[in-house]
Amino acid sequence: MNLRSISFVVLPFFLLSACLSTAQAAPKGQAAAGPPVSYTSVSQLNMLLSQVEQAAQATAVDLARLRIERWKTDSSTKRQTQANVESVQRNLQNALPEIINQLRASPEDLTATFRLYRNLDVLFDVFGSLVEAAGAFGSKDEFQSLSNDLSGLETARRSLAERMENLTTSKEAELAHLRAQVKMSANPPAPSKKVIVDDTEPAKKPAPKKKTPKTTKPATPPATQQQQTTPQPQPK
């Protein structure tokens, strides 16, 4: 993975990280506190930075041992190689430690992480040309030592590239969550209507009493009428 491909992946997320920082800023008058960094993330970064520092120290020692004046090449090549050596040494002594300290202070800062990766990428390119020159004109020991240093820088650079990829994925998820919160606050959902359901059983009304039908007695004819209807005996 080269510097250009990393740039296309990481640079857009610098703006995303800035948006997250602005949105999560503390109120006026209070200190701004960013999201807490996990112990796993800090431990991973410390191991990576220790790897970078060890590779840088070994490289600085091996560069100081070079005897470029004894190389079997022309004076112009020797001067150019010596200039490259001095450039790498200045970077290892000044620029690299400053960037490492900045990243230690902000373990998940994408800008500081990418700055370290870019610096390692430049070092790898310049130092790679020194290794090639040592292999062509220097001694076998010089070439072997510088080759080991170059491998250490390459390992650290790859580890840092993997960390950047993980950080950008995490920041993208945070930004998506933040956008959802902003959208929800701008367009709050309509309040839901409350429907009250009365599930209590109504009191039962007493059953109406059944009316008993009135029985009517047969009417008895008057006594006079009975007498009239009684047949009288016929005279013999």
Image: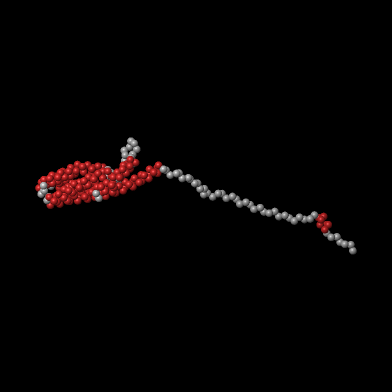
Q: Quadrant of the C terminus?
A: bottom right
Left or right: residue 217 versus residue 44 is right
Residue drawn at (16%, 50%), measured in percent from left and top? Answer: 132
* Residue located farthest toward the bottom when viewing the structure as drawn: 236
Q: Is residue 42 left or right of residue 72?
A: right
Give the percent coordinates (x, y) of residue 143: 14, 51
Q: Position of residue 98 (x, y in %)?
A: 22, 42
Q: Residue at x 23, y 45 (%)?
A: 118
At x 35%, y 46%, the residue is: 176
Name the colour scheme.
secondary structure
Q: Residue 54: image x %, image y %? A: 19, 47
Judged left or right of residue 81, residue 19 is right
Asked whether the viewer can see residue 67, the reply is no
| Image-based side of 5 in relation to 139, left or right | right
Residue most toward the top? Answer: 29
| Quadrant of the rendered image containing residue 85 | top left
Q: Residue at x 33, y 37 (%)?
A: 30
Picture coordinates of residue 80, whole percent (x, y): 14, 45
Q: 35 or 205, which lies in front?
A: 35
In the rendered image, is residue 3 in sight?
A: yes
User: How many numbered marks appear?
Assistant: 0
